[in-house]
C-alpha cells in the first residue's frame, strides 16, 4: 500500500494549496478506480443477459427476474444521496475498499441464491456500492491528481463504464450458456477480488475533508447556476436513455439488420463509447463548456439522422458509432462540471449527479415507452433527438462553467 497520505490542511488554509501542482499524480490509484467502475457496471448489467435462465432457475417470470436491475438502480439513487453524509468522517480509502467488498459479497451471494427474495436482497448491496462509488468518484479523482489533470483522470475512470457495457452482456451469455447463470456472478466476484487487491496496494490514505458540515442536495440546488446546470444534465441523460432503450428495434427497423449484424453494431457502439470517454478528457482540458454542449448535440443529430436520412448499413453504422462516441463523454463531462461548480461539497454534488442520472434513466425509459406506443421507433428517435438538441441549447445559453480555482478545488490541495 502506498504510504502517502493526502492531507487536508489546505482546506482550512487555501494559501497552502498554491504551488502544489508539482505533486506527482497517483495514476495507479486512478486505474484501480477504473477497475472498480468496470466491476460495478459488469455486475449491474449481468442480469440483462441472463434473464431467461435466471427466471427458469428461480421459478419466476422474466419480468420479475428483471427487477434485479431495477432494485440495484433504485438503491443506487438513494445511496448516492446518503453516502457522503454517512461516511463524512471516514478515510476515503476505507470507504472505497468497503464498496468493493460489498460488490464481491453481492456477486457471491447472488451466485449462491436459490430464491428471488434472496437475490434481490443481495442486489441491494450492489446498489449501495454503486451509488456510493459514483458519488465519490469525482471528489476522489480531484485528490489523486493535480488540478489540471482531473479531466484526464475522470475520463480514464469513466472508461470503465464503456468496457463494462461491452463485456457484461456477452460475458454473461457465454458463461451462462456453458456453466449456468450462477457462474457469471462467480466470475464477477473474481473480478471484484482482483480489484480489491489492486486498490489495496495503490489507493493512498485520504483523510476526510475538514468541512463545517455536509450540505444537502436542496442547499446545493439553491446555489447560483446549479439548478439550471442539473436541468441540462437531466435533459441530456433522459434523451440518451430514451434512445438507448430502443436501440435494438431501431437498428432492426431502419435497415432490417440480422442478429450477427446487430451484434457487430452494438459492439461498435460500445467501442466507440470507450473511445469517447478517453477523447473527452482531451476536450475538457481545452473547453469544458464546449464539451458539455457538443456531446448531446452530436447524439441528437445522430438520432435524427438515423430516421430521417436515406441511409443503408454503412451510413447507419457510422451514425451508431458517432452516437456511442459522443455519449461516452457526457457522464465524464458532467462529473467534472459539478466538481468545479461545487468544489467545497464535491461528494454531495456527486450524489446529486447520481440521483439525477438514475432518475433520468427511469424518465428516459418511460418517455421512450410512451412515444413508442404512439409513433413507433421513428417517434422515439425524433423525440429523443429533439430532447438532446434542447439539452445542448440550454447548456450553451444558461449553464456556466467555473474556472478551476487554486486553493479551493480539491485537486489543487493535495500534498504529502
Image (cartoon, grey):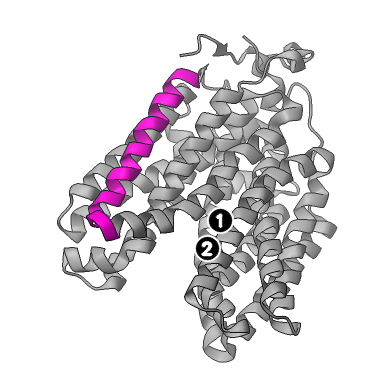
Indicate the quadrant where residue 7 lies: top right
Residue 298 rendering spot, x and y as whole percentages: 76, 63
Q: Are the residues at dot 1 and dot 2 in contact (C-beta closer than 8 Å)?
A: yes
**As drawn, 377 above or below 66:** below
Q: Is residue 195 magenta?
A: yes
Q: Residue furthest bottom?
A: 374
Residue 328 rendering spot, x and y as whole percentages: 64, 53
Q: Which residue is mark 1?
A: 357
Q: What residue sits 40% from the left and 52% below the top?
A: 44
Q: Is residue 282 magenta?
A: no
Q: Is residue 98 visible?
A: no
Q: Residue furthest front?
A: 260
Q: What residue sits 57% from the left and 29% below the top?
A: 30
Distance, label 1 to label 2, CA atoms, is 6 Å
The quarter in which the N terminus is drawn is top left
**As drawn, 148 above or below 4:** below
Q: Is residue 157 left or right of residue 19?
A: left
As rendered, which of 143 and 320 lies closer to the eye?
Answer: 320
Label 1 Cα crowd, 10 Å radius (few <14 / some 14-19 / many 20+): many
Q: Is disc 2 placed on a helix, strand or loop?
A: helix
Where does the magenta region start and end?
Answer: 177-202
Label 2 Cα crowd, 10 Å radius (few <14 / some 14-19 / many 20+): many
Secondary structure mostly seen in the magenta stretch: helix
The quarter in which the C terminus is drawn is top right
Q: Is residue 138 left or right of residue 96?
A: right
Q: Which residue is mark 2?
A: 361
Q: What residue sits 53% from the left and 37% below the top?
A: 34
Residue 280 rendering spot, x and y as whole percentages: 72, 46
Q: Is residue 140 visible?
A: yes
Amino acid at each position: 500500500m502506498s504510504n502517502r497520505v493526502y492531507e487536508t490542511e489546505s482546506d482550512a488554509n487555501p494559501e497552502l494549496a498554491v504551488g502544489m501542482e508539482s505533486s506527482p499524480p497517483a495514476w495507479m490509484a486512478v486505474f484501480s478506480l477504473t477497475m472498480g467502475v468496470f466491476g460495478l457496471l459488469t455486475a449491474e448489467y449481468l442480469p440483462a443477459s441472463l434473464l431467461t435462465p435466471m427466471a427458469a432457475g428461480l421459478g419466476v417470470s422474466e419480468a420479475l427476474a428483471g427487477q434485479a436491475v431495477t432494485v440495484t438502480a433504485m438503491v443506487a439513487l438513494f445511496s448516492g444521496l446518503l453516502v457522503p453524509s454517512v461516511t463524512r468522517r471516514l478515510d476515503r480509502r476505507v470507504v472505497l475498499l468497503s464498496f468493493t467488498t460489498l460488490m464481491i459479497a453481492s456477486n457471491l451471494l447472488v451466485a449462491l441464491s436459490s430464491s428471488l427474495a434472496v437475490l434481490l436482497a443481495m442486489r441491494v448491496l450492489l446498489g449501495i456500492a454503486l451509488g456510493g462509488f459514483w458519488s465519490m468518484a469525482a471528489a476522489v479523482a480531484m485528490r489523486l491528481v493535480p488540478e489540471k489533470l482531473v479531466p484526464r483522470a475522470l475520463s480514464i475512470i469513466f472508461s470503465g463504464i464503456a468496457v463494462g457495457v461491452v463485456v457484461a452482456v456477452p460475458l454473461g451469455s457465454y458463461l451462462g450458456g456453458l456453466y449456468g447463470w450462477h457462474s457469471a456472478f462467480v466470475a464477477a466476484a473474481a473480478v471484484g477480488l482482483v480489484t480489491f487487491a489492486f486498490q489495496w496496494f495503490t489507493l493512498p490514505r485520504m483523510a476526510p475533508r475538514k468541512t463545517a458540515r455536509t450540505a444537502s442536495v436542496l442547499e446545493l440546488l439553491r446555489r447560483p447556476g446549479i439548478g439550471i446546470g442539473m436541468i441540462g444534465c437531466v435533459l441530456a441523460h433522459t434523451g440518451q436513455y430514451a434512445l438507448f432503450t430502443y436501440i435494438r428495434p431501431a437498428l432492426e427497423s431502419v435497415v432490417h439488420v440480422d442478429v450477427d449484424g446487430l451484434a457487430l453494431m452494438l459492439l461498435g457502439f460500445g467501442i466507440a463509447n470507450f473511445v469517447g470517454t478517453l477523447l473527452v478528457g482531451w476536450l475538457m482540458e481545452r473547453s469544458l463548456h464546449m464539451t458539455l454542449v457538443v456531446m448531446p448535440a452530436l447524439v441528437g443529430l445522430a438520432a435524427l439522422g438515423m430516421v430521417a436520412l436515406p441511409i443503408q448499413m454503412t451510413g447507419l453504422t457510422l451514425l451508431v458509432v458517432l452516437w456511442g462516441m459522443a455519449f461516452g463523454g457526457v457522464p465524464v463531462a458532467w462529473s467534472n462540471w459539478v466538481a468545479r461548480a461545487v468544489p467545497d461539497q464535491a461528494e454531495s454534488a456527486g450524489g446529486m449527479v447520481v440521483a439525477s442520472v438514475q432518475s433520468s434513466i427511469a424518465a428516459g425509459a418511460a418517455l421512450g415507452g410512451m412515444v413508442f406506443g404512439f409513433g413507433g421507433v421513428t417517434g422515439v428517435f425524433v423525440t429523443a433527438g429533439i430532447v438532446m438538441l434542447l439539452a445542448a441549447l440550454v447548456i450553451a445559453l444558461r449553464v456556466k462553467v467555473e474556472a478551476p480555482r487554486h486553493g479551493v478545488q480539491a485537486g489543487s490541495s493535495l500534498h504529502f
